[in-house]
Image: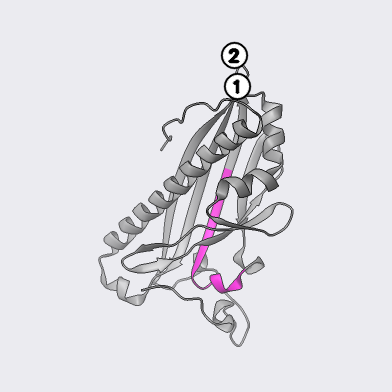
Amino acid sequence: MTSSVPSSSQATGEGSEGLFTPLRHSDDSRVRCYSSRFADLMEMRAPAPVVATYLDRHEGWFRRCAAPMQVTALDRNGYVLTLGRFGNFGFEVEPTIGLELLPQSDGIYRISTVPPEQFQPGLQELYDVEFNAALQLQEQSAEAPLTEVRWELDLSVWIKLPAVIGLLPENLVQSSGDHLLRQIVRQISRKLTWKVQEDFHATHGLDCPPRRRALF
């Protein structure tokens, strides 16, 4: 079973009052919430100011490193990212999320969710995403320049499942969905971490450190 985008009136939740309730606040029994946390570390062989300058110019590295995922710019700091097709119990979705890469504040970079109504209102009826990530630079005191970029991600997804899935045991539906989400996050986040690390060193003519085991 493959999910389909509802009509414009359904997608916006328009009725007699023209109101829409986000799935995260819905009392519909078909709506499930799946959550995952992820942490990782990138080693950059350069001083922190050099790494910060690179991260500030996300219009270059974000597109390169997110490939082959489809990336579309929303505005100066916002992007729409299509993650690919995933499924569970025969129910498939092609998650598309909006992300805003916020400017550095006290050495911390944050990435937050752009509400879907700003780029594709039809997604509101299918799923709701809350994406919060933070990256912090920590310059190490060593003979050779080295900056560690530590980052964490908290991700929650609310999705309206087909009614037939409600016939399955609740704990099976929840645990299977949580497991699938963790796999997606680990696969995408780990690959993105590697690619950012490799891209930084390649664009600065530096040898890239060996890949580390993920911290999850």
Q: Which residues are magenta?
A: 120-133
Q: Is residue 83 visible?
A: yes
* Element marked by disc 2: loop
Q: Horizontal and vertical percent for residue 24?
A: 50, 64
| Residue to which mark 1 is pinned | 146
In this picture, is 155 found above or below 206? Answer: below
> Is disc 2 surrounded by few (<14), some (14 to 19) or many (20+) residues within 10 Å?
few
- Numbered circles on residues, count: 2
| Residue to which mark 2 is pinned | 142
Residue at point 60%, 72% (across, down)? 121
Residue sticking out furthest to the right: 76
Q: Is residue 121 magenta?
A: yes
Residue at point 57%, 74% (across, down)? 122
Q: Which image quarter is the C terminus in?
A: top left
Q: Horizontal and vertical percent for residue 14?
A: 60, 82
- Kindly check if marks 1 and 2 are in contact, taking CB atoms under 8 A apart as contact: yes
The quarter holding residue 180 reads bottom left
Q: Which image quarter is the N terminus in?
A: bottom left
Q: Is residue 114 left or right of residue 88?
A: right
